[in-house]
């Protein structure tokens, strides 16, 4: 994988991520939380995989792509385009800058995770207010830790009615059963490595909201109306204090723009969201397919830039022209100097091309300007 290929993959990821974001915004209100979570997860990891995955796929199909791009771009290129090595240097600088940004973000993430790990160790040794639950000075209910997660509730909420506290605990235990802290770890690592890929964080917000909605449903499966109303008030209070749990912990806050949908599901679970219209569903599918298909053009563009930079050495293209004798071709080159015969004939003029096999089995190509013997 080259630096140019990596940058092409990054550009493709931005395009695909933006397509997924628009598509999800069109259909999310008519989807169940389970379906939305799965779809957002697919969008998240598909987008995150493009910067590295696309160049690998392009390298496998390299020869065919190189032929195709030249056929498409030949009318717009000069007949003899020497190698432009400065393009490679510029690509290396760009890739290094993106890599440095990701490394810096990853180091910061590691520091924050270390702090959370220290806090989780301290919480495990704290005296629980009730079995499996610790009260602490935190902005909202959360599940801290990975192998042995701890449910942490704000001390002020411990005086709430028992059914409400039970519901809050069930919400965090639902995160534990789903191994959401491990999922969050992988997702935060991906976003740290690709901090410039903004669509990834937008998609993650949708996925996080759906995840919280699923845990709300588990927590309130058998709750009465009074408990649901009190639970909704707690959710609003938590969102006033924080928009999300710390890195390395699952909470109940979620994404603020999804609050209306969550409150509707909490207060009246029997209400069914309207199914997205066929027009919106078709538009979402078309947008995702079009964005994904457009990455093919980005692959060809990246390969073209590499060829122009001289990454593949001298590339020659022979095109038979109508009205000329057999064996006469218009010759164009990319990524290297023209043959020596080009010194006496303008680039792009027809040449007579002959091939002869040497005694050792190798082939020799001879090019002479058309009309010259």
Image: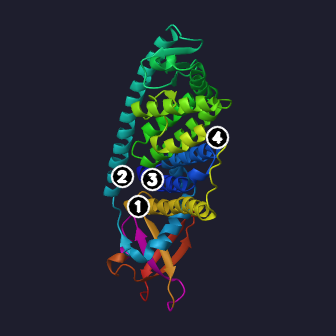
At numbered mark 4, what does the secondary structure look like: helix, strand or loop?
Answer: loop
Query: Pointer 2 and pointer 4: residues touching (CB < 8 Å)?
Result: no
Specify few, some or many for label 2: CA neighbours under 10 Å numbering under 14, 14-19, or 20 or more.
many
At numbered mark 2, what does the secondary structure look like: helix, strand or loop?
Answer: helix
The answer to whether residue 313 is seen in the rendering is no
Where is residue 62 shown, x and y percent of the image?
Answer: 54, 58
How far apart marks 3 and 1 lie (CA) works out to: 19 Å
Where is residue 363 shown, x and y percent of the image?
Answer: 54, 67
At numbered mark 3, what does the secondary structure look like: helix, strand or loop?
Answer: helix
- Side of 133 relative to 104 (left or right): right
Q: Name the residue under label 3.
A: 14
Q: Where residue 305 is drawn, which disc sits there?
A: 1
How far apart marks 2 and 3 lie (CA) works out to: 17 Å
Mark 4 and mark 3 lie on one chain; the one further toward the N terminus is 3
**Magenta span of residues:** 323-341
Q: How is the image coloured?
A: rainbow
Query: Pointer 1 and pointer 2: residues touching (CB < 8 Å)?
Result: yes
Q: Name the residue under label 2.
A: 91
Mark 3 and mark 1 lie on one chain; the one further toward the N terminus is 3
> What residue is at 48 percent from the left and 48 percent from the top?
51
Residue 22 lies in the magenta-colored region: no
Q: Where residue 269 is drawn, which disc sits there?
A: 4
Mark 1 and mark 2 lie on one chain; the one further toward the N terminus is 2
> What residue is at 64 percent from the left and 40 percent from the top?
269
At numbered mark 1, what does the secondary structure look like: helix, strand or loop?
Answer: helix
Query: Pointer 4 and pointer 3: residues touching (CB < 8 Å)?
Result: no
Query: Pointer 2 and pointer 3: residues touching (CB < 8 Å)?
Result: no
How far apart marks 1 and 2 lie (CA) works out to: 10 Å
How far apart marks 4 and 3 lie (CA) works out to: 36 Å
Quarter of the image with the C terminus in it: bottom left
């Amino acid at each position: 994988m080259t630096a140019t290929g990596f940058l092409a993959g990054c550009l493709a990821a931005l395009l695909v991520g933006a397509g997924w974001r628009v598509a999800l915004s069109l259909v999310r209100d008519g989807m169940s939380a389970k379906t939305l979570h799965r779809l957002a997860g697919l969008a998240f990891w598909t987008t995150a995989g493009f910067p590295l995955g696309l160049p690998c796929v392009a390298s496998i199909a390299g020869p065919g792509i190189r032929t195709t791009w030249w056929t498409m771009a030949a009318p717009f290129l000069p007949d003899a385009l020497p190698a432009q090595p400065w393009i490679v240097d510029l690509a290396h600088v760009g890739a290094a800058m993106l890599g440095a940004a990701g490394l810096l973000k990853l180091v910061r993430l590691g520091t924050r995770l270390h702090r959370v790990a220290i806090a989780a160790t301290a919480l495990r040794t704290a005296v629980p207010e009730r079995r499996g639950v610790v009260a602490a000075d935190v902005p909202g209910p959360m599940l801290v830790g990975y192998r042995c997660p701890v449910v942490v509730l704000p001390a002020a909420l411990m005086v709430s009615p028992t059914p409400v506290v039970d519901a809050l605990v069930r919400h965090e235990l639902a995160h534990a059963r789903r191994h959401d802290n491990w999922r969050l770890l992988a997702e935060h690592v991906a976003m740290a490595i690709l901090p410039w890929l903004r669509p990834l964080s937008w998609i993650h917000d949708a996925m996080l909201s759906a995840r919280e909605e699923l845990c709300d449903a588990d927590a309130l499966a058998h709750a009465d109306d009074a408990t649901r109303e009190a639970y909704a008030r707690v959710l609003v209070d938590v969102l006033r204090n924080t928009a999300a749990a710390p890195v390395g912990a699952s909470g109940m806050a979620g994404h603020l723009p999804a609050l209306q949908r969550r409150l509707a599901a909490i207060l009246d679970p029997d209400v069914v969201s309207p199914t997205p219209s066929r027009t919106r569903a078709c538009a979402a599918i078309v947008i995702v397919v079009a964005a994904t298909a457009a990455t093919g053009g980005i692959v060809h563009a990246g390969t073209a830039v590499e060829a122009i930079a001289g990454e593949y050495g001298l590339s020659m293209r022979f095109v038979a022209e109508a009205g000329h004798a057999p064996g006469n071709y218009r010759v164009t080159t990319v990524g290297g100097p023209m043959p020596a015969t080009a010194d006496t004939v303008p680039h792009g003029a027809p040449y007579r091309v002959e091939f002869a096999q040497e005694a050792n089995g190798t082939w020799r190509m001879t090019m002479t300007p058309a009309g010259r013997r």
